[in-house]
Image (cartoon, rainbow, N blue to C red):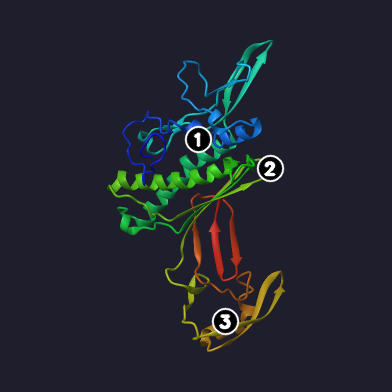
């Protein structure tokens, strides 16, 4: 952002000259109250003009001071301190400054005396730590290994898709005013995308003085569920630049124009727990006709489907050495991926 009130956005975050700078906006905690004015006017039956926001100028360590003046002139005050942790905005580029994400805490009083008061790392903070300290650096390492030379902006995209799948038990609900939500998961989705984008922009500027603004698709997929969190990361790249049919990593047939070939699925069955697609085609090449005619004895032994219609195959890149291997089959697409899961 280019100003304190957050009204003017910036395309990039590249100014890295002060590791102790607060990266958060000065109005950050005011933003987090939104839409408190609507809620107060509805619950208390007061006008919007009677709800006044002012900057706190006292010395007490607090985040919010709520002062209520009743019709009889009496005043009540309520105080709240929002707990936060402190970390660099980007681990690999600490000179960008520090951010202060919300965190958990435990406070214990015994006979009115405080005996314990400390922060507790939340599930989202643990996921964020993995994303910053492992996922993004390993993506960078893959890019440098793949290119095997100096990385430049004209070589973008460096990968096809960085899939970030998160399952976590966090607040995610409508609050009954306008279309507003209380959603830590929605905030995580936004932060993962934009921080990933900032990471690659700074990577480019600080290595070759170029902005890497199109490294590949960064796609967070955030899901709510009860229980322990899980974080699965998969990095994809194109297997082939042009659409084709692959058989055991070899190009079986290249893309043809519409009308050059006709192929119709006549029956879908199964054989030894594997999908069998039976079809009839016109103007098939001898190679393709031989493949489909031998499907029951040829392809079933090699795959989970006799006929694999592939418009564009994607191959996921291993970003950790260990982890499970799986295959996904979708209509028109075969994906192979190697993924990592963090619990």
Q: Which residue is mark 1?
A: 31
Q: Which mark is residue 226?
A: 2
Q: Residue at x 27, y 47 (%)?
A: 209
Q: Residue at x 38, y 48 (%)?
A: 200
Q: Residue at x 31, y 43 (%)?
A: 206
Give the answer, above or below, for where 201 lies relative to 15: below
Q: Is residue 142 left or right of residue 269?
A: left
Quadrant where the N terminus is found in the figure: top left
Residue sitting nearer the eye, 2 or 94: 2
What separation in Å lies between label 2 and label 3 (alpha carbons)? 47 Å
Pinpoint residue 37: horizontal percent, then vertical percent: 56, 34
Give the answer, above or below, for where 310 lies relative to 319: below
Q: Earlier in the sequence, mark 2 or mark 3?
A: 2
Pinpoint residue 299: horizontal percent, then vertical percent: 61, 75
Tell me if mark 3 has few (under 14), some (14-19) or many (20+) residues whose alpha carbon lies within 10 angstroms of its own.
Answer: some
Q: Which residue is mark 3?
A: 291
Q: Earlier in the sequence, mark 1 or mark 2?
A: 1
What separation in Å lies between label 1 and label 3 (alpha carbons)? 61 Å
Label 1, secondary structure: give it: helix
Q: Which mark is residue 310?
A: none
Q: Earlier in the sequence, mark 1 or mark 3?
A: 1
Tell me if mark 1 has few (under 14), some (14-19) or many (20+) residues whose alpha carbon lies within 10 angstroms of its own.
Answer: few
Q: Is residue 163 left or right of residue 197?
A: right
Residue 343 seen in render = no
Q: Residue at x 48, y 31 (%)?
A: 100
Residue furthest out toward the left:
209
Residue furthest out toward the front:
72
Residue sitting nearer the eye, 174 or 105: 174
Label 2, secondary structure: give it: loop
């Amino acid at each position: 952002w280019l100003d304190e009130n957050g009204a003017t956005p910036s395309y990039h975050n590249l100014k890295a000259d002060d590791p102790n700078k607060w990266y958060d906006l000065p109005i950050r905690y005011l933003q987090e109250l939104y839409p408190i004015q609507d809620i107060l006017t509805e619950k208390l039956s007061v006008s919007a003009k009677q709800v006044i926001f002012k900057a706190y100028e006292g010395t007490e360590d607090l985040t919010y001071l709520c002062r209520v003046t009743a019709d009889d002139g009496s005043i009540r005050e309520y105080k709240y301190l929002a707990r936060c942790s402190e970390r660099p905005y980007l681990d690999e580029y600490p000179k960008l400054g520090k951010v202060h994400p919300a965190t958990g805490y435990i406070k214990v009083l015994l006979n009115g005396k405080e005996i314990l008061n400390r922060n507790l790392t939340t599930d989202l903070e643990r996921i964020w730590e993995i994303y910053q300290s492992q996922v993004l650096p390993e993506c960078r390492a893959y890019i440098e290994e793949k290119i095997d030379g100096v990385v430049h902006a004209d070589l973008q995209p460096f990968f096809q898709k960085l899939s970030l799948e998160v399952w976590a038990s966090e607040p995610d609900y409508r609050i009954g005013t306008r279309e507003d939500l209380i959603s830590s998961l929605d905030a995580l989705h936004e932060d993962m995308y934009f921080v990933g984008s900032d990471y690659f922009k700074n990577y480019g500027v600080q290595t070759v003085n170029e902005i890497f603004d199109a490294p590949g698709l960064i796609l967070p997929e955030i899901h709510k569920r009860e229980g322990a969190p899980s974080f699965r990361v998969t990095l994809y790249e194109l297997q082939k630049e042009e659409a084709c049919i692959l058989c055991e990593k070899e190009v079986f047939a290249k893309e043809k124009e519409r009308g050059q070939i006709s192929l119709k699925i006549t029956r879908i069955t199964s054989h030894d727990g594997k999908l069998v697609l039976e079809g009839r085609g016109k103007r098939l090449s001898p190679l393709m006709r031989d493949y489909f005619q031998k499907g029951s004895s040829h392809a079933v032994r090699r795959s989970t489907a006799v006929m694999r219609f592939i418009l564009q195959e994607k191959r996921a890149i291993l970003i950790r050495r260990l982890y499970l291997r799986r295959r996904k089959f979708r209509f028109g697409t075969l994906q192979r991926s190697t993924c990592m899961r963090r619990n």
